[in-house]
Image: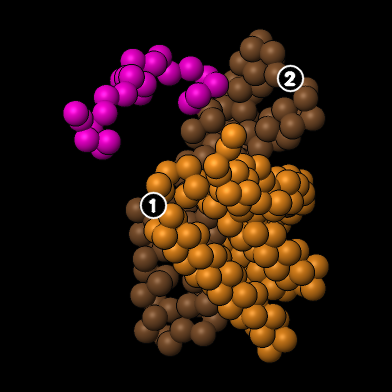
Chain colours: A orange, B brown
Amino acid sequence: MSFKSEFSKIKSRGSSSSGVHHWWSQRFTAICLIFLVIWFVMSLTGKISQFGGVTPHILVRDPIDIISLILLILVAIHHANLGIQVVFEDYVSCKCLRVAMIVAVKIISYASAFAAVFGLIELYLS
Amino acid sequence: MTNIKERPISPHLTIYRPQISSMLSIMHRATGVFLFAGLVIFCWWIIAMIYGTDELKSCVSNMTSHILSQILIFSWSFSLFYHLLNGVRHLFWDMGKGMSIESMTKSGWIVVFGSLVLTISSWSALLEF
């Protein structure tokens, strides 16, 4: 006869439900990034050959450039956060530290990405 | 009785021969982390060059034209191509294809050489303007 409470029987068993979503988001963003990165590399090498150096100004000349660059930054940051979460989960054993690091990286990366995107839009409009 | 922190474990990194499977796998993780760091720094560079004072902008320009930065950017580009090609390899595995040891070895070498070829060709295309 088990003297365990019902709750203690299900603790540490099974998924917390967001695992599959994480897996799919990682693959979907990866597929999007294949196209975005190929575009970015070709566009950037073309631009650098044309202008000699790199400044944010050469990156935002046409709407298609700026839209693709914004998509690249946002999708890449999302993909990277999903990936780094797995890395932290693998190597950081202390739960509070692990959560803190995942959250800190998420905040810093998304804030930087959004600020950069805003800057690019503002640059294009000016 | 040994403390829980002092229990012995079997040797792993010290005795296992490096193989294409394990080396490419850890490279995929390492390049991923490095790409993330570079991406965030790229965002900071954009912010600095758009919103920075003239002093900050010249400071950042000097830093980015330094040979050390050029080496880092070169490594970042290699990481990008490596992570891209190995990522495609992973996606094929997710579909269940190419998981035999022979396929894995072959595709692994394609990833390594492909990354080198792509890095070198894109940088030569860049430097021959």
Secondary structure of the residue carrying tag 1 is loop
Residue drawn at 36 percent across, 21 percent down: B12
Q: Which residues are magenta?
A: B1-23
Image coordinates for residue B32, horizontal then vertical, percent:
54, 46
At label 2, the amino acid type is: Gly
Tell whether A117 sits left or right of A86.
right
Q: Split into 4 quadrants, where in the image is the N terminus of chain A?
A: top right
Residue drawn at 66 percent across, 85 percent down: A122
Q: Chain of mark 1?
A: A
Residue drawn at 49 percent across, 33 percent down: B26
Q: Residue furthest top?
A: B102
Is residue B5 on the magenta stretch? yes
Between marks 1 and 2 in the image, the one whose residue lies nearer the viewer: 1
Position above or below: A30 against A118: above
Query: Label 1, label 2: how many angstroms apart (C-alpha)?
Result: 37 Å
In this rendering, the count of numbered labels is 2
Residue placed most toward the observer, A77 or B126: A77
Can residue A119 be seen here? The reply is yes
Q: Split into 4 quadrants, where in the image is the C terminus of chain A?
A: bottom right
Q: Which residue is mark 1?
A: A94
Residue drawn at 55 percent across, 42 percent down: A3
Q: Which residue is mark 2?
A: B98
Q: Residue furthest front?
A: A1
At label 1, the amino acid type is: Cys
Is residue B80 on the magenta stretch? no
Position above or below: A34 against A66: above
Residue placed most toward the observer, B10 or A8: A8
Q: Chain of mark 2?
A: B
* Main SS category, magenta section: loop
